[in-house]
Each structure stands twice: as structure tokens, then as C-alpha cells.
Image (spheres, rainbow, N blue to C red):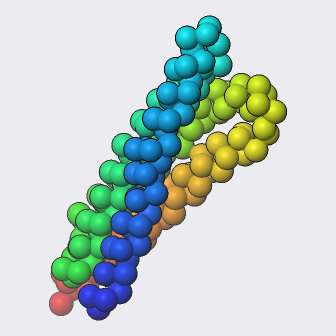
Amino acid sequence: MKRGSTLLLKIAVILIGVPILGLCIFLLPQIAREAFEHAGKGAVLAYVVFGILIIMYLSAIPFYFALYQALRLINYIDKNQAFSQISVKALKKIRTCAITISGLYVVALPLIFVVAEWDDAPGLILIGLVIAGASMVIAVFAAVLKKLLQEAIDIKSENDLTV
């Protein structure tokens, strides 16, 4: 594969990670500060917001690990090692990370429901469902790619043995 197309993929992976990093550095601490101010007044809702923020920060860990695995997978493609077991392992790790993110947001849905009821914003629940659903779609896609790649590797090894 040409270097230019993999460079574009690397840039795309990095551009996917930058907004989430900005969210974790700037927006989430601001939300935590406001929730902390309300917690001092005895608002139970602030503790619910803290729970959601903790889950959001926890979901950033597998998200960035999956992005790192995607960059490694692109590097394997650059080195003509795309059809190898290390690529299969990278796809398996991406699938596991996507399932973890989806699970975290499924756990967060009751907390999001409480905030949505309080703020009268049903769109919040939809956002939580979209994140959980998108993560599951990515997990299924990674699993399918892993299976196809494993079958291609098996066929390639059979052909190498017959020649």
C-alpha cells in the first residue's frame, strides 16, 4: 500500500483523538467544578453527575488504547505485515476496547436518565444510547475483520505449505 494513503489514515486516527482529549482536558473538569459547587449545597444530582464524569473518564482509557492499536495496525500495513497474527491481535484488542466502552455507557445510562429527567432533556439519553450503540458497531466490525483476516492468514499458510 502506498505511504500516502496510510499517512492519511494515521492523520484521521489522530484527528479522532484530539476532540476527545480536548473534552477530557477542558469541558469535563468545568462540569465537575459546577457539580462540586452544587454538591456543597446538598444537591444529590451533583453526585449523579460525578458518576457520569467518572464513567466518561474511564471510557477515555480504552478509547485511546484502541486508537493506539489502530495506529499499530496501520504501521503493520506499512511494513507489509498486514496478514499476520499481530494484526489479528490488534483487531481483537480494538474489539475488546469497544465492548468495554459500550459496557461503561450502558452502566451510565441510568445516571444519564436521572440527569435527563431533572433537566427535562430527553436528548441526553439518546446521546448515551448512540455512544453505546456506536461502540458495539465498532466491536462487531472489528470482530468481522478479525475473522476475515484470520481466514486469509490460514489460506495463505496453506498455500505456502503446498508450494
Q: Is residue 40 above or below residue 7?
A: above
The C terminus: image quadrant? bottom left
Task: Write the residue at 46% across / 57% down.
Answer: 19
- Please indicate, yes or no, whether residue 101 appears anywhere in the rendered image: no
Q: Residue at x 65, y 50 (%)?
A: 130
Of the pair 69 and 89, the residue shown nearer to us: 69
Q: Is residue 150 above or below residue 98?
A: below
Q: Quadrant of residue 72?
A: bottom left
Residue 33 x/y as whole percent: 50, 27
Horizontal and vertical percent position of residue 107: 58, 30
**Left or right placement of residue 76 versus residue 60 in this view:** left
Give me the residue at 56% from left, 27% from top: 34
Total residue callouts: 0
Q: In the image shown, does 43 or 89 lie closer to the viewer?
A: 43
Residue 109, percent from left and from top: 65, 33
In the displayed structure image, the side of residue 97 where residue 122 appears, left or right? right
Seen in the image, is 66 located left or right of residue 72? right
Which one is nearer the viewer's eye here, 53 or 86?
53
